[in-house]
Amino acid sequence: MLAGKKITELKSELSSDIICPKCDYKNSTKVIIIGVYKHLFQIPFISGGKTGKSICTNCNTTFELSSMPSNIKLAYYELKENVKTPFWFYIGIITLKALVLIKIFSKYI
């Protein structure tokens, strides 16, 4: 594929105080922060933001961010505050800018 977008799991945490709304099992909900980036020739260029989902390890129920119950959504936002967008999401654009600067300054040497 020439260009597109990919997703990667940035961080996940098994929350101890959340009860699954489907099976009522405590200590089984895993909250996951997912990073999205756009790539060209498989080289990441730009971050597409962060999203999330939750999975119950007992009943395998998955909630996307838009359909998460409020208690799980609160745990998601708390976890998202601590997760930074990785540096390598921008490695393509940084390399491109560096090559342009090298080309510009090579005229003056």
Image (cartoon, rainbow, N blue to C red):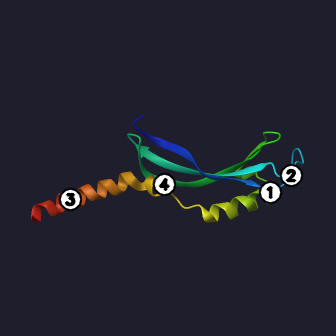
Q: Decide if residue 36 is on the left or right side of residue 16.
A: left
- Badge 3 is on which residue? 102
- Distance of label 3 from label 4 (alpha carbons): 24 Å
Label located before the other in sequence (1 or 2):
1
Q: Is mark 2 on a helix, strand or loop?
A: loop
Task: Tell me which corner region of the image, top left, top right, bottom left or bottom right, holds residue 84.
Answer: bottom right
Which numbered disc, 1 or 3, marks the residue closer to the eye? 1
Kindly identify which residue carries mark 4.
47
Please give the residue where the numbered disc 2 appears in the rendered image. Answer: 26
Badge number at residue 16: 1
- Amino acid residing under circle 4: Ser
Q: Is residue 70 left or right of residue 4?
A: right
Q: Distance between the residues labelled 2 and 4?
A: 34 Å
- Tell me what residue is drawn at x 32 percent, y 54 percent: 95
Query: With 105 as the anchor, is 88 left or right in this view?
Result: right
Tell which of 67 and 16 is nearer to you.
16
- Please state the horizontal and vertical placement of residue 89, each as a whole percent of the image: 46, 53
* Badge 2 amino acid: Lys
Task: Give the residue at x 44% y 53%.
Answer: 88
Q: Earlier in the sequence, mark 2 or mark 4?
A: 2
Which tag is nearer the camera, tag 2 or tag 4? Answer: 2
